[in-house]
Image (cartoon, rainbow, N blue to C red):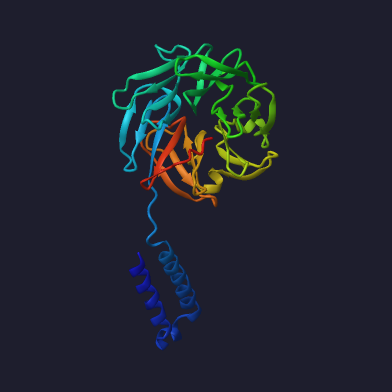
Amino acid sequence: MVQPILELTLYSVSLLGQAPIIKTMNPVFYLKTYLILLSIFVSSLSSEGKEAITHSFLGAGKANGVVIVGEDRKVQWRLDMPASDGWVLSNGNVLLALYATKGFPNGGVVEVDRKTKKIVWSYKGQQKEISTVQPLGSGKYLVAELGPKPRAIVINRKGEILKSTPLACQKKNFHMQTRMLRALPNGNYIAPHLLDFAVKEYNPDTGEVLRSFPTDDRGRGKRDWPFTGIRLANGNTLIGCTNGNRVIEVDTKGKIIWSVDNGDIGENLFDDACGVQRLPNGNTVITSYHAKGDSVKLFEVTRDKKVVWRYRGQKAGFHHFQILTTNGKPIKENTWR
């Protein structure tokens, strides 16, 4: 890349010194050409040597089941069970929140042995649907259970319910009650309530709503249903707005301080922005759940809204995902929390 540009730049300089050409052609044109080529040359020098971005990840969804994709974009592991949420655990096993199946008619939670694909332990949903699961440590797990009495429950590996917290959301559409429920470092829960157009923070002991971040600033017709709510290290909250096809970052008072959508990136990669993840370098990875065929299923954008990585594999998009490694280095801190 650098050598051809260098040659063109030097050629432009040589033209400036050729009197016959300058007499017949506008010298300002050559000066502008020289400056443009020089800027490209300098830019290429600054970018040369940068390592191409590669990621490995866990992806969960209905159509694809569950896959682990390597940095070479090849599927390393697959499980044919429909899941809406998942984690690769420290023991190498995979923790999943399952959609309804024959063995789990109301959804459920399973830990699966990666080598044998056998279920290590499980929990069967007691209402209509299980949407999310999060490991809490010490053999405990936070689960979102949807239905007539939506709740956040803490279970153990025996499937016993240790704690239950009611969730303040609509009760007409169970599937759209809540998605990526998460426990925060301060012990509170954060839950995106889609048809309520709000991400709410709860006191897990009382069920009190401590804070609420609305997502209907553009009007509810935009369908900015919050699917993912991530509390960032700076105290802000990153929200994936599903059908609204945008991701927003709000401060502690709910003010939008950053957002990105198709108009910002100059192409239609957003297609039901469900799962999102903020990486340690400040970039954001976004999933397009409705993407099909050769369309982009996952992509990474910088803070200044440049697309720097994309993944087109699998027949359909993912509901959620977990970036595992970047350029061979494990993501030590999972930024979903």
- Identify which residue is drawn at 37% across, 37% down: 294
9 over 234 or under it: above or below: below
Most foreground residue, 34 or 68: 68
In the picture provided, is 128 more to the left or to the right than 51? right
Task: List the single residue furthest toward the front.
Answer: 138
Most foreground residue, 134 or 243: 134
243 over 328 or under it: above or below: above
Could you say which quadrant of the image residue 117 lies in? top left
Query: Residue 54, image x and y in percent?
Result: 38, 46
Query: Residue 115, image x and y in percent?
Result: 29, 26
271 over 121 or under it: above or below: below
Query: Residue 194, image x and y in percent?
Result: 60, 27
Name the quarter where the C terminus is drawn.
top right
Most foreground residue, 15 or 60: 60
- Identify which residue is drawn at 60% across, 40% down: 248
Name the quarter where the N terminus is drawn.
bottom left
